[in-house]
Image (tube, helix red, strand yellow):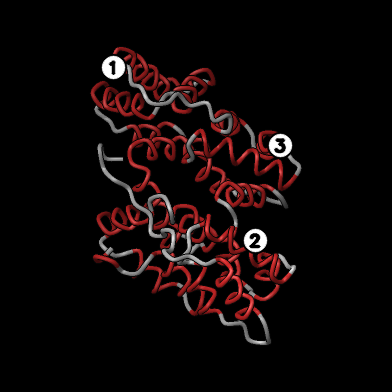
């Protein structure tokens, strides 16, 4: 993140909030043969996650039913994924996405990379707890059994949530940069381990200094160096970590652009990023998207999605504010 920059989401707590009234309106919207999808969008995308939890509580008291279960029953396809996703508390939503990325025949490595490379220590701790509560499984054990090699080692390191916080030591930055440079030259198993140890454990301010030193030593940007030296999911994960250190909002803008343009609108990725970042930095992500790709995220979603699904995504994006 650029120094001193204020990051902003797109969804904020609604003023004059009345969970009982919202629960009543949702109950009405979900009754009958044709459910009122516009009403669902209007309420759920204009309340903070904490407010949605209060609405779910009021809904349960009022109707004796679970709001998530009713949304799942009444809705379908990607629109259902968005509305249900909005109802999970953030750690539960990440846990849900990680679980689905690993269960079944294949593993969705991109989901593992995106979540674990970008979350803070505190967020990772809460995700591990939520995962255990929701699925009676251990997240570390599942990652261990579903991945392999240095990719697995790096994920296992990240999921510990033990990155140093806050401080930077210029004296050791040059030393760390030399280790990274050697790791890009030698590429032995030992060097790969040293590389991931530095990228997973050093604080963001420290890594910021290390990358500057690396540029001085090698004449190359850290991302370019990793792309030149390594391949596969290990390389993608290392690049994701570096991009998040450099500027997290730019990382997500890049992920969204690729999901929309390179993968023919990869719905799961678009939905996950919009929901997960809506109260953190989605407005900043939209700004980066426009700066880097020349078109607004709003415009690109409009081009690819349709119907109530499109309406819901655009509502989370919070309109084409200031041309972002």
User: Looking at the image, which residue is at 55% across and 60% down?
Assistant: 268
Looking at the figure, which quarter contains the C terminus?
A: bottom left
Answer with mark 1 or mark 3, whichever residue precedes in sequence. Answer: 3
**Residue that lies at the very extreme toward the bottom in this rendered image:** 33
Answer with mark 2 or mark 3, whichever residue precedes in sequence. Answer: 2
Work out whether residue 313 or residue 48 is closer to the camera in this orientation and state it: 48
Secondary structure found at label 1: helix
User: Looking at the image, which residue is at 64% across and 34% down?
Assistant: 148
Secondary structure found at label 2: helix
The alpha-carbon separation of the residues under discs 2 and 3 comes to 28 Å
- Contact (CB < 8 A) between labels 2 and 3? no
User: Looking at the image, which residue is at 42% across and 69% down?
Assistant: 315
**Depicted 14 relative to depicted 213: above or below:** below
User: Looking at the image, which residue is at 44% across and 52% down?
Assistant: 277
**Depicted 300 relative to depicted 229: above or below:** below
| Label 1 crowd bin: few (<14), some (14–19), many (20+), radius 10 Å | few
Answer with mark 1 or mark 2, whichever residue precedes in sequence. Answer: 2
- Contact (CB < 8 A) between labels 1 and 2? no
Q: Position of residue 256 (x, y in %)?
A: 42, 56
Residue 130 sits in quarter: top right
Looking at the figure, which quarter contains the N terminus?
A: top left
The alpha-carbon separation of the residues under discs 1 and 2 comes to 50 Å
Q: Position of residue 187 (x, y in %)?
A: 47, 23
Which numbered mark, 2 or 3, is in the foreground of this view?
2
Task: Find disc 2 in the rendering and name its residue.
Answer: 57
Residue 170 disc label: 1
Residue 138 disc label: 3
Q: Position of residue 217 (x, y in %)?
A: 26, 21
């Amino acid at each position: 993140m650029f120094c001193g920059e204020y990051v902003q989401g797109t969804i904020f707590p609604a003023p004059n909030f009345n969970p009982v009234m919202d629960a009543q309106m949702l109950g009405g919207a979900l009754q009958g043969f044709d459910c009122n999808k516009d009403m669902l969008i209007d309420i759920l995308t204009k309340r903070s996650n904490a407010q949605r939890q209060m609405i779910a509580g009021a809904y349960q008291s009022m109707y004796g039913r679970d709001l998530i279960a009713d949304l799942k029953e009444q809705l379908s396809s990607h629109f259902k994924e968005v509305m249900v996703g909005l109802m999970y508390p953030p750690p539960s939503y990440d846990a849900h996405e990680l679980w689905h990325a690993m269960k079944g025949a294949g593993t969705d490595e991109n989901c593992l990379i995106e979540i674990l490379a970008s979350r803070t220590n505190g967020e990772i701790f809460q995700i591990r707890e939520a995962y255990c509560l929701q699925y009676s499984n251990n997240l570390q054990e599942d990652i261990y059994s579903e991945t392999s090699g240095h990719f697995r080692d790096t994920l296992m390191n990240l999921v510990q949530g033990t990155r140093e916080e806050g401080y930077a030591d210029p004296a050791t930055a040059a030393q760390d940069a030399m280790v990274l440079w050697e790791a890009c030259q030698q590429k032995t198993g030992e060097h790969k381990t040293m590389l991931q140890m530095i990228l997973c454990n050093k604080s963001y301010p420290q890594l910021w200094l290390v990358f500057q030193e690396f540029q001085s030593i090698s004449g190359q940007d850290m991302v370019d160096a990793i792309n030149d030296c390594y391949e596969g999911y290990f390389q993608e994960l290392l690049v994701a970590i570096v991009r998040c250190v450099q500027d997290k909002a730019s990382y997500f803008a890049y992920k969204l652009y690729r999901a929309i343009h390179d993968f023919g609108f990869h719905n799961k990725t678009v939905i996950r990023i919009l929901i997960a970042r809506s109260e953190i930095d989605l407005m900043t992500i939209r700004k980066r998207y426009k700066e880097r790709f020349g078109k607004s995220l709003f415009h690109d979603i409009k081009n690819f999605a349709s119907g109530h699904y499109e309406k819901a995504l655009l509502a989370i994006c919070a309109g084409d504010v200031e041309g972002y």
